[in-house]
Image: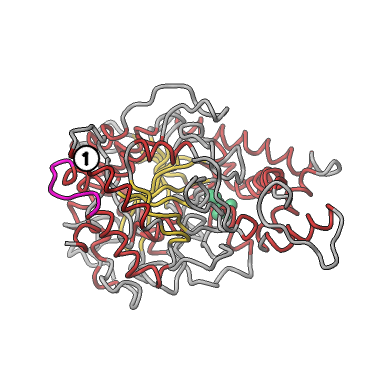
Amino acid sequence: MSDDLTRLTASHLAGLLAAGEVSSVEATRAHLDRIEQVDGDLHAFLHIAGDAALRRAGEVDRLRADGADVGPLGGVPVAIKDVLCTKDMPSTAASRILEGWIPPYDATVVARLRSANLIPLGKTNMDEFAMGSSTEHSAFGPTHNPWDLDRIPGGSGGGSAAAVAAFEAPFALGSDTGGSIRQPAAVTGTVGVKPTYGGVSRYGAIALASSLDQVGPVSRTVLDAALLHDVIGGHDPHDSTSLDQLWPSFEQAARAGAENLDLRGIRVGVVRELSGEGFQTGVQQRFDEALALLASAGAEIVEVSAPHFEYAIAAYYLILPAEASSNLAKYDSVRFGLRVTPEGGGTVEQVMAASRGAGFGPEVKRRIILGTYALSAGYYDAYYGSAQKVRTLIQRDFDAAFGQVDVLVSPSAPTTAFKLGAKMDDPMAMYLNDITTIPANLAGIPGMGLPVGLAPEDGLPVGIQLMAPAREDARLYRVGAALEALLEDHWGHPLLDLLPADFGRHPAGADRIVPLPGPGTEPDGGTH
Ligand code: GLN
């Protein structure tokens, strides 16, 4: 029973809880058992709530038994990226400088999970301060990809993605500044959504780059992402950039998408600059097949150009370090966090230097140096100022593209999961991973990643990214749920069913992949 409960989607589990067929204690215990069983291999969690989770689950069970309305997701377990403040668990952003720090308050999104009676299972691993694409920059050691333990789970939110893919949690919260929800989703075969900037509160999310950060859901289905998004989203007076508007029900959008697979009238724009050269063959192939499937459902597929996307990475890696260097200035060893006193004592400056020297990892230091340089008086116009102008040009590219189409698509990431260690000595190679996801952050628009199969050459998951204009997140849920349903009809099961039970010990073989009809596919369905 235990194992079965962990295989259920959040929406399915919520149904069983509501019907009284399963208790929250049983569901929570099943996930904690699963964590116990596999997290030694994965290291998706930095902190496991254990007793607190079971206690809370018991309370929710009692509330339900007393006839209280515990909400549609009451009693369902959830994992939380360690970038989010939780008043009952350490919140470290995977940095030594915050090791053991327990915040005095909950992030708004966490408070909303609690009031919706979800059960926090623990805090998930990430790249330090969310800087990275592989979770290898965590000060507490990397997370492993359940599809192949020698490979990265993506980053920075590799912990949340791996936990969801490996059935340690039905869904999780992530944060996405340049792709940290969508790229881990791509390489683990999960669904991830970066909401419209301002759609979800950033209050209590440990800041990386404030003009880019958004919290969002990670799940195994589009519907589950929508359910979680409905819980965490909406206006928050504690966040001055929070949009004060009413949002439609994303659950309804996802349900409508799954029920109506007729996509006639939907125009899908393929971004020319986000495919082709530099993209792995199998990634491109699965992406093209997904497009063929959308076309077979009646969607109109057109190519659109976004000429300034070629400068997106350069602009992002100036804007992000500039904002990050300011945000990280508060870790001064005085107010909170690690304090290292040099031998024999020292001035305030010396204590601060020693603390920051010991507390921050190499990638964080690299970005602080980059950011302070880009903001320095002599170079501000040349670097930071130019990057902001490029940001505007990218926003205009999106405006022009959305004048022609309803959604834009690209592969979620240029390659499948690479080997742990492969890019650690080459920051530039690591940064290039973000080419597909960064434009949406620079423009503040919503993006969704969902799995479209396994690459024939390595048997690893491939994701498609859907993007919509700002505030049109519901459109992503509708089209995403339709595409997901079309794919599952074709495969006959969800993609994650292919994840071996003893995952990671041997990579999934290409022979287990059902190809889709589409370009490059033989009539008998064989692609290789
Ligand atoms: N990989 C990107 C970076 O290193 C994205 C990080 C993020 O979204 N938090 O900045």
Q: Position of residue 76 (x, y in %)?
A: 28, 47
| Residue that carries the numbered disc 1 in the rendered image | 258
Residue furthest top as drawn: 245
Q: Position of residue 275 (x, y in %)?
A: 46, 53
Q: Residue at x 38, y 32 (%)?
A: 406
Q: Is residue 280 above or below residue 229?
A: below
Location of residue 392 (image quadrant): top right
Q: Residue at x 30, y 51 (%)?
A: 290
Q: Is residue 282 above or below residue 386?
A: below
Is 24 magenta? The answer is: yes
Magenta segment: 18-25
Total count of labels: 1
Location of residue 353 (image quadrant): bottom right
Element type at mark 1: helix
Camera-side residue of 409 and 142: 142
Camera-side residue of 468 and 250: 250
Q: Amino acid at mark 1?
A: Ala
Is 487 magenta? The answer is: no
Location of residue 459 (image quadrant): bottom left
Q: Local crowd at mark 1 within 10 Å, few (<14), some, or many (≥20)?
A: many
Q: Main secondary structure of the magenta part?
A: loop
- Would residue 186 be visible to someone looking at this image? no
Camera-side residue of 405 and 36: 36
- Would residue 58 be visible to someone looking at this image? yes
